[in-house]
């Protein structure tokens, strides 16, 4: 594979390790099992076994380890069936150590938006005027883009930016991979991004929800069609900026942009 390096600004380097999101301290426990896609049984430190909601409906390849530590968020509410939500998982890293991975698939869009607002991608995307979420676009207006960015009026490039986010937790060694299973939805999104090129910019942001990875590549072994479309999109002019984050008991930090390994 060929490494394609992204341009790093001094500002981006200075931002490394900065907290983008803070929250109440998560509770730690041991994963017993994950089942029915949406459920996970966890034994807390006090010995209590609770059932937590699992927002990640995929196979969770490389991050599902019964017997290892996990972190849960406690949010009791009359509108929720479960009081606990599974947020993070401790996994083996390529160097023999361990790291914490964010497994809540509802979080990446939020932290990428926070990274944009903190100017972490200002050199890649330029000054931003407005960010809108879930805007209808694409063929027959049957898709929704994660973020539609309108550049600031002072931007050199005034084209709108269609930005798609992909949560990435699977790794092979120190290379982050997406997807971890066949994704016809992801294939469609690549085609839609190619379709906006010219009048607009198409941008794919793999949200690398683990800090131990050194580069990003498409998960060819899980979905070879996605891999082909990914390279087609790159050649067509779709821009890819893999953004890496660190996960802690009370926060998520910015860990920079990783190069492409294609």
Image: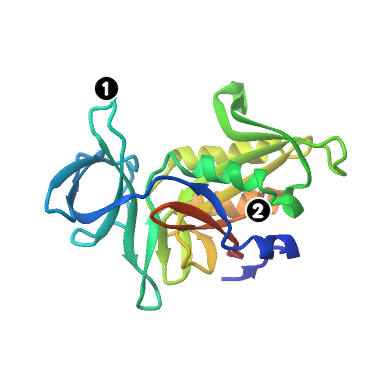
- Image quadrant containing the N terminus: bottom right
- Image quadrant containing the C terminus: bottom right
Give the left or right position of residue 53, taking residue 208 as reference: left
Q: Which mark is residue 205?
A: none
Give the left or right position of residue 116, taking residue 253 as reference: right
- Label 2: few (<14), some or many (≥20) within 10 Å? some
Give the left or right position of residue 6, taking residue 96 as reference: right
Q: Quadrant of residue 91?
A: bottom left
Query: Colour scheme in the image?
Result: rainbow
Residue at image point 68% right, 64% down: 14
The location of residue 191, given as percent across then percent down, is 59, 39
Earlier residue among tags 1 and 2: 1
Disc 1, disc 2: CB below 8 Å?
no
**Residue 203 versus residue 12: which sits nearer the camera?**
12
Q: Which numbered mark, 1 or 2, is in the foreground of this view? A: 1
Q: Is residue 9 visible to us here?
A: no
Check disc 1 and report its element: helix, strand or loop. Answer: loop
The location of residue 2, given as percent across then percent down, is 61, 71
Residue at image point 57% right, 45% down: 112
72 lies above or below 79: below
Label 1 vs label 2: CA separation?
Answer: 46 Å
Q: Is residue 202 visible to us here?
A: yes
- Residue under pointer 2: 234
| Count of marks placed on residues | 2
Residue at image point 43% right, 39% down: 106
């Amino acid at each position: 594979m060929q490494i394609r390096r992204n341009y790093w600004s001094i500002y981006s380097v200075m931002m490394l390790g900065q907290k983008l999101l803070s929250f109440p301290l998560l509770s730690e426990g041991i994963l017993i099992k994950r089942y029915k896609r949406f459920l996970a049984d966890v034994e807390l430190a006090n010995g209590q076994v609770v059932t937590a909601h699992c927002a990640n409906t995929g196979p969770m390849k490389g991050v599902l380890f019964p017997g290892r530590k996990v972190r849960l968020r406690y949010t009791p509410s009359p509108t929720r069936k479960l009081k606990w939500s599974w947020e993070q998982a401790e996994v083996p890293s390529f160097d023999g150590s361990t790291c914490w991975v964010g497994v809540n698939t509802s979080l990446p869009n939020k932290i990428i938006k926070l990274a944009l607002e903190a100017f972490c991608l200002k050199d890649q995307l330029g000054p931003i005027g407005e960010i809108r979420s879930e805007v209808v676009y694409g063929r027959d207006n049957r898709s929704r883009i994660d973020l539609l960015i309108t550049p600031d009026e002072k931007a050199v490039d005034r084209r709108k930016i269609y930005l798609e986010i992909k949560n990435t937790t699977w790794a092979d060694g120190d290379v982050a991979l997406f997807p971890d299973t066949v994704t016809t939805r992801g294939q469609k999104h690549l085609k839609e991004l190619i379709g906006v090129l010219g009048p607009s910019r198409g941008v794919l942001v793999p949200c690398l929800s683990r800090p131990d990875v050194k580069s990003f590549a498409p998960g060819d072994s899980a979905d070879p069609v996605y891999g082909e479309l990914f390279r087609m999109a790159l050649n067509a002019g779709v821009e890819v900026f893999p953004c890496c984050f660190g996960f802690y008991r009370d926060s998520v930090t910015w860990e920079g942009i990783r190069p492409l390994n294609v």
